[in-house]
Image (cartoon, helix red, strand yellow):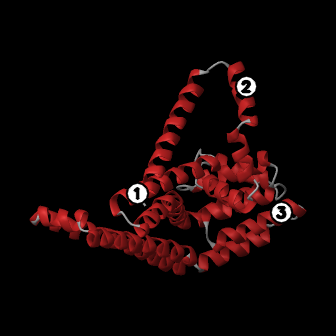
Amino acid sequence: MLTLSYLSAAALFFCLIYIAFYYLLLDWSTEQRMIGKLNYRLRTGLRYRLVERFKSHDRLYRHISELLEALQLKLSPIAFVAASALCLLAGVAVGGLFFQSVKGTLLFGCLLGLLPYTLLRSLLVSRRMQTQMDFLPAVELFYQCYVVTGERQVRIALQRTIEEKRLLGPMQSVFEQLYRNLSVRGDDEASLRLMSAALGHVWADYFSNILRVALAEGVPISDSLRELLGDMRKARRAGEQERNRLLEIRIANFSPLLFLGLYIGINLRYNKDNSYYYYVVDPQGRDMLLNAMLLIFASFLMGLWLSRKKM
């Protein structure tokens, strides 16, 4: 296991040095002609082949790209996968050197490798919780703009809704992203699916279906929007109860980590020497820390899954 950890540390060090030199050279070559030559080289090099190989896995590539775009992060899917791979190498290296066991090496590597994706999912859940209360006023404003514009074009109503600057919280950026994708992207289905992923609740799916019918068939959707608004107003109290449950789930997610930090902090405060021995030197203590981190990570994933089911 030490050999595997040393190899992972060496690979991680090589990747970091490569990335550092790559971006230094990219910043240094400021002329447009040199940048064009560099891009041409990339299309025939190893990096370009790796990107094309990753794009061949359509479901995985589309899932990661939609997740990044729903969060409006200026990060490419291949860069995210590369960061996850670096975290995996770092986890294998640190796990092998600290835990000195097959279990510690593999589990700690998997934990760090999955950490970027878990952080993105938690950010998406937080954003969905912020947009739940503001979705009803946003649909009401869109309905007003749709009626005022003559019930003709969904894109014109979206533009009018954005120009009003009355959308609350993150809903302004969500509707701006939807209008931009519908105007530029050329794939209405992907644009509506992206909005549903960013909001993450059943009312967003209904709203997306209504817009999908209007964009595909060009029929008026005033009656459907009125029915949707009526159903959303009736379900507002139930939605408040669900948000309270989601808040309880999020608090429960972080409570094991807080208790572990409190427990270790108290032991270090009153007995540093013995705590260092049983947490760092003793193999059973290191195994206990690994099991604790594994359980905390599993509980965090369970909380994310329950939050998704509640929305």
Tell which residue pokes out farthest to the left in this image: 270
x then y, percent, for residue 306? 52, 77
Residue indicated by mark 3: 214
In which quadrant will I find the N terminus? bottom left
Q: Is residue 263 left or right of residue 180?
A: left
Q: At label 3, which amino acid type do we have? A: Ala
**Secondary structure found at label 2:** helix
Q: At label 1, which amino acid type do we have? A: Leu
Question: If you read the primary sequence from the N terminus, does the residue marked by circle 3 or circle 2 appear first?
Answer: 2
In the image, residue 29 sits, relative to residue 149, either above or below, namely above
Residue indicated by mark 1: 2
| Quadrant assignment, res 292 | bottom left
**Secondary structure found at label 3:** helix
Any mark on residue 36, and which? 2
Q: Is residue 193 left or right of residue 242?
A: right
| Quadrant assignment, res 36 | top right
How crowded pointer 2 is (Cα within 10 Å; few <14, some 14-19, many 20+) is rated as few
Judging depth in this view, the residue of 154 and 151 nearest the camera is 154
x then y, percent, for residue 270? 9, 66
| Quadrant assignment, res 286 | bottom left
Q: Is residue 104 left or right of residue 217?
A: left
- Residue 233 in sight from this viewpoint: yes
